[in-house]
Amino acid sequence: MTAERLTGAIRELIEQVATADASDAALAEAADAVRAVTAALREAGEPRTLSFAFNGERPDRSEYRRLNPVSGDLNPLAAPLRYDRVSEDAVEASVTFGVAYQGPPGYVHGAHIAGAFDDVLGLANLASGNPGMTVRLEVRYLRPTPLRAPLSIEARCDGREGRRIFASGRLMAGDVVTAEAEGVFAEITARRAAALFIREGT
């Protein structure tokens, strides 16, 4: 739980920096404090190289998912997006974007919406037994997506043709669909994942 507490505290700091105005003296004091904490953590820890562990026939993605920049509970860059239901038929997720993710005033930057879709569609494929890497992601922004509002994302795997996998999803603010996405993914097997992502000794 300690790592999760630190991650949450950093998220609060990021949001505060993005939203609050302060005097130069207060900002300078905060910068010195952040640098001091960063230096202490650097001294106390060791660099970490992320890779999949290989367990039998499948890579273990647990560490990767926890550090994911979209949905990882240990990554302060993540909003984070939370998965509420994962099944072979569909994936449902929820997220609330703070001001740190702002594009137009009061609304979410489109790049963060695309990132959320990429994560959710990818998990929908994985849950359906069709893991793949993104080849193409098309997002249709139907209307602005509000900040600081509970949002939901639904996604499903739509099928496959050979090594090509297809998925789609939609983003909603309440009952209003603010964006839709369709993706094409290339099948990735456990053997291929091991060759690409697993390093000796990690």
Image: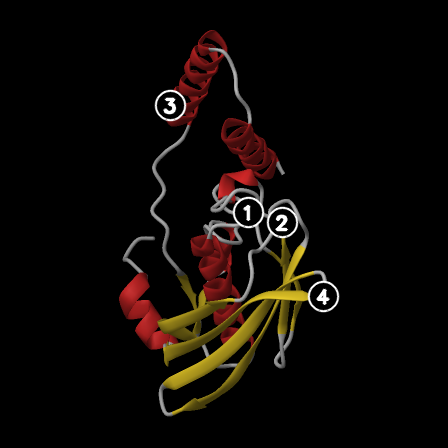
Residue 88: assigned label = none
Q: Amino acid at mark 3?
A: Glu
The alpha-carbon separation of the residues under discs 3 and 2 comes to 34 Å
Residue 25 drawn above or below residue 81: above
Q: Position of residue 177 (x, y in %)?
A: 62, 67
Residue assigned mark 1: 79
Dot 2: element: loop
The alpha-carbon separation of the residues under discs 2 and 4 comes to 15 Å
Of marks 2 and 4, the one in the foreground: 4
Q: Earlier in the sequence, mark 1 or mark 2?
A: 1
Dot 1: element: loop
What is the quadrant of residue 36 in the picture? Answer: top left
Q: Earlier in the sequence, mark 4 or mark 1?
A: 1
Q: Which residue is more in the foreground, 89 or 20?
A: 20
Of marks 3 and 1, the one in the foreground: 1
User: Pointers 3 and 1 in contact (CB under 8 A)?
Assistant: no
Q: Earlier in the sequence, mark 3 or mark 1?
A: 3
The local crowd at label 3, few if under 14, some if 14 to 19, many if 20 or more residues have their Cα within 10 Å, is: few
Q: How many callouts does the rendering have?
A: 4
Residue 96: assigned label = 2
The alpha-carbon separation of the residues under discs 4 and 3 comes to 49 Å
Q: Amino acid at mark 2?
A: Thr
Residue 175: assigned label = 4
Residue 93 drawn above or below residue 69: below
Name the residue located 55 percent from the left edge and 33 percent from the top edge: 15
Residue assigned mark 3: 43
Q: Position of residue 91 (x, y in %)?
A: 62, 71
User: Pointers 1 and 2 in contact (CB under 8 A)?
Assistant: yes
The alpha-carbon separation of the residues under discs 1 and 2 comes to 7 Å
| Residue 131 can be seen, yes or no | yes
The alpha-carbon separation of the residues under discs 4 and 1 comes to 21 Å
